[in-house]
Image (cartoon, rainbow, N blue to C red):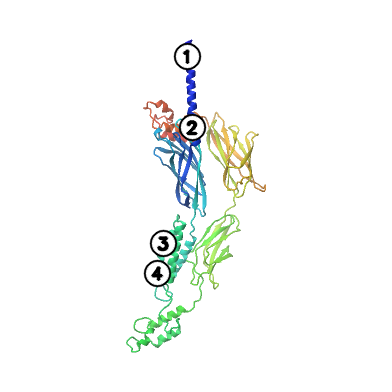
Amino acid sequence: MRKRKKNRTFLVYALLILLSANWFADLPLANAEESIRASLSGEDTVQAGQAFSLTYGLKGVSEAVYAQDLTIRYDAEQLIFLGADSMKDHFSIIGLSEAPGHVRIIAASHGADNAIQRDSELLTLRWSSQPLNHAATSVVSVIDTVVSNGDGVEISVSGATHTVQIAVANKWELLSLIARAQAAHDNAVEGGGLGQYPKGAKAILLTAINSAKTVADQADATQQQIQLASTELEEALRVFLASMHTSEPGDLNGDSKFTIGDLAIAAASYGKTSADPDWANMVKADVHADGKIDIADLAIIARAIWSSLPETPNTPEWTAVKRIDVSGVTSSGLTLTWSGAADPVGVTEYKVYQDGNAIGTVTGSVYQYAITGLKQSTMYSFKVEAGIASGLWSTNGPSVTVTTQAGHSPSVLFTGQESVVGGGSFALIYGLRNVTQSVYSQDITILYDAEHMDFIGVDTLGEGMSTRIDSDIRGQVRVMLTNQGAAPVNEDADLLSLNWKAKVLDQPAIATITINEIILTDSKGIETRISGATHQIRISLADKEGDLNSDNKISVGDLAMVAAAYGGTSADPEWAKYARADVNHDRKVDIEDLAMTAKWIFR
């Protein structure tokens, strides 16, 4: 009897020791959850179309981290996700899934020696900015980050954001200058005559033109490089034009012009040579400089006379590379930009035509015109012609056809995980896209399969918003979302997290959740009804396979336990401790077990 009493006393003390050990073991995790956080750093400014990278890491690490599950959100209209790479040996990306605007990454360390135990930079996230035609500010956010220690205890980690300024270089001034310089080059003639250029002058100008073209063709050229190329080409063109011959031998009567009087003086001396005794009086008529006055001298003076006569003005000429570009196309407007035309007396203005009708003019130094008041989803033809002071206009100017954009109504974002184990909780995100006017309140009706899930509640994802929920009808939830004196919703935003719990089923099932009706209201109380959206989720049977921490789900905590056992084999003395992590049952814990666990997490 006394022996049984001693045994019972021993069991009570043992139980108390175990409970106290578990209570104290939770203290570091609580402290870790308060301090650990994600970090995101990298370039602050990039050119449109330029590749760049950001660095993800953890800060405030106070105990070993074996596995991580993080989601990255970005604007797919501004950025392109290219991929991710590990920055640390024996730390691998086990799984990666991507949808426009979202990337989910699951990563794990290889064994206890490689666990993350201090602040570390872990992943290189590779991006490229979209080839935008306007400057933009883009935000990349790390959200929904969960890490786990080797015992499968999961910790939610504070997220991080990084802002990238996308710059767009303006090349239109350089392109117009290249067109003008090319026209001057193509129309020039080298020689010693009036209006001609010294030999080799065209080659020098062409070299400057080609250097400027190289900069203009670079997609990632900076504004400073473009400005320098413009300055250098402008100077080369000025030097070239200044080198043109403005006078020619043959002004025999000294009146600073070439006329029939000069030709008469040469004709009177015709036949004279340097052997004649009065050659000194005749030598000025030897404009050919060959020691005699003959038909060659008369021809030179005649050409000079023709060159000095006023010419009948011609219409401005467009170069062979004439172009007109369209930018900033919206549902009601756009901007035209064109290369310049050339004319000896100078282009004084440009006239813009829309569908054959003149709609405006600009001066000859302006190569851009903004057009407004257009109809949405409509095709228009535009053309530009050049004019000179005499009133003559070109007829072969560049033209373009363009269709305006369609007007957009707001659309619904309704997204979230696609599968859940019976008895597990899940959340779906509701938001608005293509928002073009302010929204102050929203009336949202949601239908769901009450046989397969229960509605838990709603969390707002923005500041200054309140909700009123009516879920009295089984299988239906009505949410009234209102902005309380804060700024209205006037841009794309994720607004609500709708929370659910899957029921424990006897058979797997696919359940449907439908946003059936949405009514948006502006500041004037005007209501707009928009189309809803549907989301399906697969509910699988509760399965203990892979649920190493026995929390009725397979998550990053289970992955961490596999990572902590990484490298263990059935030959190890402590294999009984590691055996649960051998999820593919090949008597060793390696990358295949990590990959299988990650696959279950994504499932």
Q: Residues within 10 Å of mark 2 (few under 14, many from 20)?
A: some
State the residue position of label 1.
6
Q: Do the residues labelled 1 and 4 touch (CB within 8 Å)?
A: no
Residue 210 sits in quarter: bottom left
Q: Which residue lies furthest to the bottom in this view?
A: 277
Distance Cα–Cα, label 3 vs label 2: 62 Å
State the residue position of label 2.
29
- The amino acid type, in three-letter code, at marker 3 is Ser
Residue 135 in view of the camera: yes
Q: Position of residue 558 (x, y in %)?
A: 47, 32
Q: Position of residue 306 (x, y in %)?
A: 45, 79
Distance Cα–Cα, label 2 vs label 1: 36 Å
Helix, strand or loop at disc 3? Answer: helix
Q: Earlier in the sequence, mark 2 or mark 1?
A: 1
- The amino acid type, in three-letter code, at marker 4 is Ala
Q: Give residue 201's mark.
A: 4
Q: Give residue 211's mark.
A: 3
On screen, residue 165 above or below 417: below
Q: Do the residues labelled 3 and 1 touch (CB within 8 Å)?
A: no
Q: Which of marks 3 and 2 is nearer the N terminus?
A: 2
Helix, strand or loop at disc 4? Answer: helix
On screen, residue 79 above or below 4: below
Helix, strand or loop at disc 1? Answer: helix
Q: Earlier in the sequence, mark 3 or mark 4?
A: 4
Q: Give residue 157's mark.
A: none
- The residue sitting at 48% across, 12% down in the picture is 4
On screen, residue 412 above or below 66: below
Helix, strand or loop at disc 2? Answer: helix
Distance Cα–Cα, label 3 vs label 4: 16 Å
Is 326 situated left or right of 588 in this image? right
Q: Earlier in the sequence, mark 4 or mark 2?
A: 2
Distance Cα–Cα, label 1 vs label 4: 112 Å
